[in-house]
């Protein structure tokens, strides 16, 4: 009764397999061509049979966890971005456990396939919810501020991705606007920054704008002349917004 617990490709055509049986731990290496099949027995002792049982037990536990995750995902799609991100975190942790826990190799492959499918499904849900949240935030800002040449404001989100998507939505709706949005994480003081400028804006590059603000906030930023993002820290988001707007006005003369 041989139980393969791990397999790793070393070079093309040659893999290293570690397996256990009820009598010995067996390291199995096999290659293509004339190398044939080689077995090297390595390890004896009173615990050798327990290793095989532990591998099967751990495989059973992980299989139950993956089944539970799949059942919850198939029951209903995540209704909020927070729940979708929690599902993603759980699936990633399970994937790491499946990759690194000694379990039968056939079972590892089966669970990896199921987890990859779950992660794809979760990723699709996250992108959809991010786009929805960004569209809602952009609509609120446009109603409140209109299509101004300079729009610097704050939005409520814990996601840098949602922040960037909101900036993209605003720029699409108002292509002549210089847009910068900040998201303040009150529990940590961290500030997410994202900005976008019109294509014909030689006086103010998005990367210069984001870098200037984020450096002032003790952080860093990067991007292109059109789109940029970064992070920093501040206890006063109002002052950060005022400074970012003043910087843009001086550069653009508006």
Image (cartoon, rainbow, N blue to C red):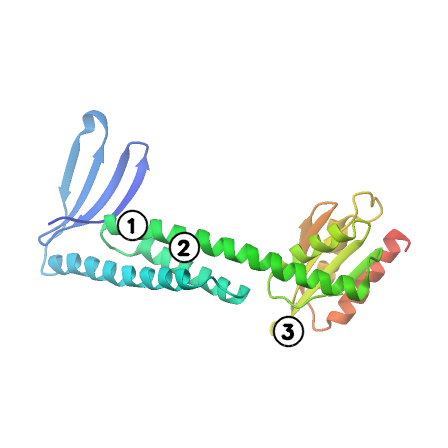
- Residue 75 drawn at (x, y percent): 40, 63
Mark 3 vs 1: CB contact within 8 A: no
Q: Residues within 10 Å of mark 2 (few under 14, many from 20)?
A: many
For mark 1, what is the residue?
Answer: 110
Q: Residues within 10 Å of mark 1 (few under 14, many from 20)?
A: few
- Residue 216 drawn at (x, y percent): 74, 62
Relative vertical location of residue 59 with respect to residue 7 in this rendering, above or below: below
Relative vertical location of residue 34 with respect to residue 233 in this rendering, above or below: above
Side (left or right) of 73 relative to 223? left
For mark 3, what is the residue?
Answer: 186
Which of pointers 2 and 3 indicates the residue nearer the eye?
2
For mark 2, what is the residue?
Answer: 118
SS under mark 2: helix
Instruction: Identify which residue, 26 or 155, lies in the foreground.
Output: 155
- Quarter of the picture containing the C terminus is bottom right
Mark 2 vs 3: CB contact within 8 A: no
- Residue 141 drawn at (x, y percent): 75, 64
Furthest toward the front, the residue is 75
SS under mark 3: loop
Cα–Cα span, label 1 and label 2: 13 Å
Instruction: Identify which residue, 151 or 93, lies in the foreground.
Output: 151
Cα–Cα span, label 3 and label 1: 43 Å
Q: Residues within 10 Å of mark 3 (few under 14, many from 20)?
A: few
Q: What residue do we see at 69% from left, 52% from top?
A: 168
Q: Quadrant of residue 233?
A: bottom right
Relative vertical location of residue 171 with respect to residue 61 in this rendering, above or below: above
Which of pointers 3 and 1 indicates the residue nearer the eye?
1
């Amino acid at each position: 009764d041989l139980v393969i617990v791990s397999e790793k490709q070393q070079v093309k055509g040659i893999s290293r397999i570690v397996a256990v049986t009820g009598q010995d731990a067996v390291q199995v290496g096999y290659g293509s061509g004339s190398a044939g099949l080689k077995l090297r027995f390595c390890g004896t002792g009173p615990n050798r049979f327990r290793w095989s049982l532990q591998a099967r037990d751990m495989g059973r536990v992980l299989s139950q966890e993956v089944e539970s995750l799949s059942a919850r995902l198939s029951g209903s799609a995540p209704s909020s971005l927070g729940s979708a991100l929690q599902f993603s975190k759980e699936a990633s942790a399970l994937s790491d456990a499946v990759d690194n826990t000694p379990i039968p190799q056939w079972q590892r492959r089966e669970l990896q396939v199921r987890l990859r499918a779950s992660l794809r499904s979760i990723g699709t849900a996250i992108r959809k919810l991010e786009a929805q949240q960004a569209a809602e935030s952009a609509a609120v800002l446009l109603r409140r501020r209109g299509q101004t040449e300079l729009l610097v404001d704050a939005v409520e989100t814990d996601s840098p991705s949602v922040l960037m998507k909101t900036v993209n939505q605003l720029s699409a709706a108002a292509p002549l606007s210089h847009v910068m949005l900040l998201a303040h994480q009150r529990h940590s003081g961290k500030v997410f920054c994202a900005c976008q400028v019109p294509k014909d804006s030689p006086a103010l590059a998005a990367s210069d704008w984001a870098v200037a603000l984020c450096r002032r906030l003790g952080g860093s930023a990067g991007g292109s002349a059109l789109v940029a993002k970064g992070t920093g820290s501040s206890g006063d988001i109002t002052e950060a917004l005022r400074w970012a707007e003043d910087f843009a006005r001086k550069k653009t003369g508006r």
